[in-house]
Image: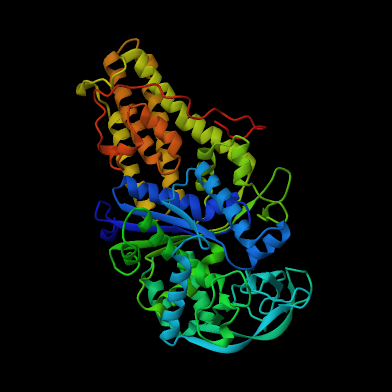
């Protein structure tokens, strides 16, 4: 393991998940992209002894929330509050353990932090005030932010692209490179009008972005994508907008009247303001929260979806460089989109407007098992390419991997041991140990090392695959040693088999804690252990001798195909 990643009490890490627009519900794509992976990472780091802060929140400003408010007959603040509350409940139901989930419109430090950030860049001379051509909806009388204009990419002719970037070729789009533009607010053709804005010239920070890219912890696919963006040349991006729902531009300039900060300018600053709010909630000074972003004591790692790559890996890095006092993130963990395939249908993109989504609130309300979904979304994690959520596949993996491979192993070994050897984990005679026993413990150590490496590299899919493969090894070991047979003629060998199997099961419980915390906690409860007292290296170092065993409940009730995985 890289020395920079040695875990322990001296390691401090700030983990953030992308701020979610507070105008819609959570679906499985959100979970697979920025939230379950971050939660796995945080749980692992804490087990390994690191001091971790885990923050996120809702992105409350901008036209998206205004449009939803108009549609629902509410104020933007009411819309943001409603969806933020539903997000918090969904995250709680899925076992996502944020230290703080705030919102850009309710965090008491966010507006000032955003305005101070803007002024710092302005005072350093990095903003350019100029007249710009921008798409405008004449019927609604509003200027249209990038994401509320759609048209045909002027570079590759891909249709139905947003006004900021083409999903197909990756090129940055503007009024000159989006053809047949139309307003998504009204559906009418978008015209172009002049307006005054403050621009940040991203090209001035190409060196800083390039230098950061060389050392930042990013997946190779992400690095290649960002290099491609740099290769096409960076542009000037307006950091102000002509709308009413947002943070006012903090300048004494007549042209700044009625303008607000671009939502993608203030949103990532929410990571900083949320860090400060968390410090305040813990009774620490506000300065200590801000210091996390100004000193080298703490690693900062962002978790996002692929559509946010340009904002976090180019614009955010340029913004931080322009501000001059905040440090850059150590890593950005980018996951690709998750597509979906319902029974009898083709693979399609998850879409709120078309209703092609599995909503987290509905999944939980219908009795869906959070651990089952956490497991499945990690097993098919879109870490290097887009993958497909399939309800039948969820059902199949739940039954085979969790119910059969893990659950059956735990229940049959613990119950057999309690019945035939008493409640305490017994001692065994060393002379009856055979190579199969030693290979099992060696495999446990190798798996633990492999899983640790994968988790440090934020390869969560690979880590989970390693744990489940070890569970399969455990089942093969038990079948080979057949304690139900040796019990009749050789109790010494039987006891040794059970002790080795229990060591392996305990190790499985520890290694599964980041992935399926509820079920893993039940596994460890069989050994009388509280999750709060478990440490990552307990998987290989903890002595079970003399521990009183308890029969755990059924971990995973096999699901009928017509039912949800509702163990």
Along the viewing direction, whichever of 550 and 298 lies nearer the viewer = 298
Along the viewing direction, whichever of 448 and 366 lies nearer the viewer = 366
Along the viewing direction, whichever of 412 and 12 lies nearer the viewer = 12
Specify whether 538 is left or right of 64. left
Q: Is residue 334 visible?
A: no
Which residue in the rendered view is the most extreme toward the top?
488
Query: Residue visible at 71% across and 62% down?
Result: 70
Residue 295: x, y in percent? 29, 68
Residue 275: x, y in percent? 39, 60
Query: Residue visible at 40% across and 34% down?
Result: 521
Query: Residue visible at 29% across and 34% down?
Result: 441
Q: How is the image coloured?
A: rainbow
Q: Is residue 547 visible?
A: yes
Query: Residue visible at 30% across and 53% down?
Result: 51
Specify whether 475 is left or right of 395. left
Quadrant the C terminus occupies = top right
Residue 454: x, y in percent? 38, 51
Residue 256: x, y in percent? 56, 83
Total marks in image: 0
């Amino acid at each position: 393991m890289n020395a920079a990643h040695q875990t322990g009490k001296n390691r401090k890490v700030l983990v953030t998940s992308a701020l979610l627009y507070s105008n819609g519900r959570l679906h499985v794509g959100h979970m697979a992209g920025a939230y379950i992976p971050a939660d796995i990472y945080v749980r692992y780091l804490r087990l390994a002894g690191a001091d971790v802060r885990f923050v996120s929140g809702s992105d409350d400003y901008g036209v998206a929330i205004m449009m939803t408010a108009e549609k629902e007959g509410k104020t933007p603040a009411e819309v943001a509050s409603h969806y933020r509350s539903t997000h918090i409940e969904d995250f709680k139901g899925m076992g996502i353990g944020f230290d703080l989930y705030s919102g850009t419109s309710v965090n008491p430090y966010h507006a000032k932090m955003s305005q101070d950030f803007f002024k710092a860049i302005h005072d350093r001379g990095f903003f350019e005030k100029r007249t710009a051509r921008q798409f405008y909806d004449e019927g609604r009388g509003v200027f249209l932010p990038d994401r509320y204009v759609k048209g045909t990419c002027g570079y590759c002719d891909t249709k139905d692209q947003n006004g900021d970037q083409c999903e197909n070729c990756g090129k940055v789009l503007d009024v000159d490179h989006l053809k047949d533009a139309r307003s998504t607010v009204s559906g009418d053709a978008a015209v172009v009008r002049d307006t005054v804005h403050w621009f940040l010239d991203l090209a001035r920070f190409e060196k800083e972005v390039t230098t950061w890219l060389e050392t930042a912890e990013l997946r190779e696919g992400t690095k290649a994508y960002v290099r491609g963006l740099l290769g096409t040349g960076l542009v000037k991006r307006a950091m102000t907008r002509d709308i009413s729902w947002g943070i006012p531009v903090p300048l004494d300039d007549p042209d700044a009247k009625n303008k607000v900060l671009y939502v993608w300018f203030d949103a990532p600053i929410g990571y900083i303001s949320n860090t400060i709010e968390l410090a305040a909630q813990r009774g620490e000074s506000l300065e200590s929260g801000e210091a996390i972003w100004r000193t080298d004591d703490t690693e900062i790692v962002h978790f996002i979806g692929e559509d946010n790559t340009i904002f976090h890996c180019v614009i955010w890095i340029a913004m931080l460089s322009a501000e001059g006092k905040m440090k850059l993130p150590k890593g950005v963990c980018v996951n690709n989109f998750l597509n979906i395939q319902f029974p009898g249908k083709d693979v399609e993109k998850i879409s709120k407007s078309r209703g092609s989504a599995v909503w987290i609130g509905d999944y939980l309300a219908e009795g869906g098992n959070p651990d089952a979904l956490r497991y499945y979304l990690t097993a098919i994690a879109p870490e290097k390419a887009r993958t497909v959520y399939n309800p039948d596949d969820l059902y199949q993996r739940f039954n085979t991997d969790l119910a059969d491979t893990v659950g059956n192993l735990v229940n049959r070994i613990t119950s057999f041991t309690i019945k035939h050897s008493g409640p305490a984990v017994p001692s065994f005679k060393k002379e009856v140990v055979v190579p199969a026993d030693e290979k099992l413990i060696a495999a446990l150590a190798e798996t633990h090392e492999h899983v640790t490496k994968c988790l440090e590299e934020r390869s969560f899919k690979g880590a989970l695959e390693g744990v489940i493969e070890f569970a399969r090894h455990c089942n093969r070991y038990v079948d080979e040693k057949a304690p139900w047979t040796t019990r009749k003629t050789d109790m010494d060998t039987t006891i040794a088999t059970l002790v080795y199997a229990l060591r392996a099961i305990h190790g499985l419980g520890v290694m599964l804690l980041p992935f399926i915390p509820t079920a893993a906690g039940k596994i460890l409860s069989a050994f009388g252990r509280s999750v709060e007292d478990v440490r990552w290296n307990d998987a290989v170092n903890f002595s079970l001798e003399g521990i009183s065993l308890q029969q755990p409940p059924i971990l995973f009730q096999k699901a009928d195909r017509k039912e949800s995985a509702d163990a």
